[in-house]
Image (tube, rainbow, N blue to C red):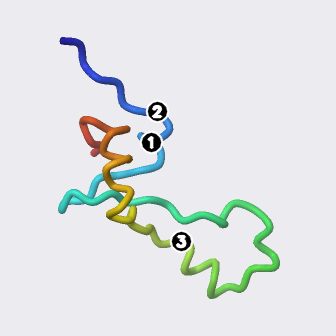
Amino acid sequence: MPKMKSNSGAKKRFRKTAKGHYKRGKAYRRHILTKKTTKNKRKLRHAGLIHESQEHQVRAMLPYGTK
């Protein structure tokens, strides 16, 4: 049976953690940053986790996980 393909967009956006959850980057950090507060931009630097109700969707897109 051939190997399953991973979703290319998901490969670039999600990383698997040691405990098996998935990390993601936060939104609203690309442009129009002048009206956002320094505190808000600082909080957007840190990665978030995929909510457990959506983890099954990411797992389906990344059948072999990522590094």
- Residue at image mark 3: 45
Task: Name the amino acid, label 1.
Answer: Ala
Q: Report the residue at 80% width, 67% height from top.
A: 32
Coordinates of residue 12 in the picture (x, y in percent): 47, 43
Badge 3 crowding class, 10 Å Cα cut-off, few under 14, some 14 to 19, many 20 or more, is few
Dot label at residue 60 = none
Secondary structure of the residue carrying numbered label 1: helix
Vertical side of 9 occupied by 32: above or below: below
The tag earlier along the polypeptide, 3 or 2, is 2
Coordinates of residue 14 in the picture (x, y in percent): 41, 50
Q: Report the residue at 44% width, 67% height from top.
A: 47
The reply to whether discs 1 and 3 touch (Cβ–Cβ < 8 Å) is: no
Task: Name the amino acid, label 2.
Answer: Ser
Describe residue 28's horizontal placement relative to residue 5 as left or right.
Answer: right
Q: Quarter of the image holding residue 22?
A: bottom left
Q: Residue furthest front?
A: 53
Mark 1 or 3: in front is: 1
Badge 2 crowding class, 10 Å Cα cut-off, few under 14, some 14 to 19, many 20 or more, is few
Asked whether 42 or 59 is in front, the reply is 59
- Residue at image mark 2: 8
Describe residue 41's horizontal placement relative to residue 20 as left or right.
Answer: right
Q: Report the residue at 36% width, 31% height from top.
A: 6
- Residue at image mark 1: 10
Vertical side of 47 occupied by 40: above or below: below
Q: CA distance from mark 1 to mark 3?
A: 19 Å
The tag earlier along the polypeptide, 1 or 3, is 1
Vertical side of 25 occupied by 5: above or below: above
Secondary structure of the residue carrying numbered label 3: helix
Q: CA distance from mark 3 to mark 2?
A: 23 Å
Q: Quadrant of the N terminus?
A: top left
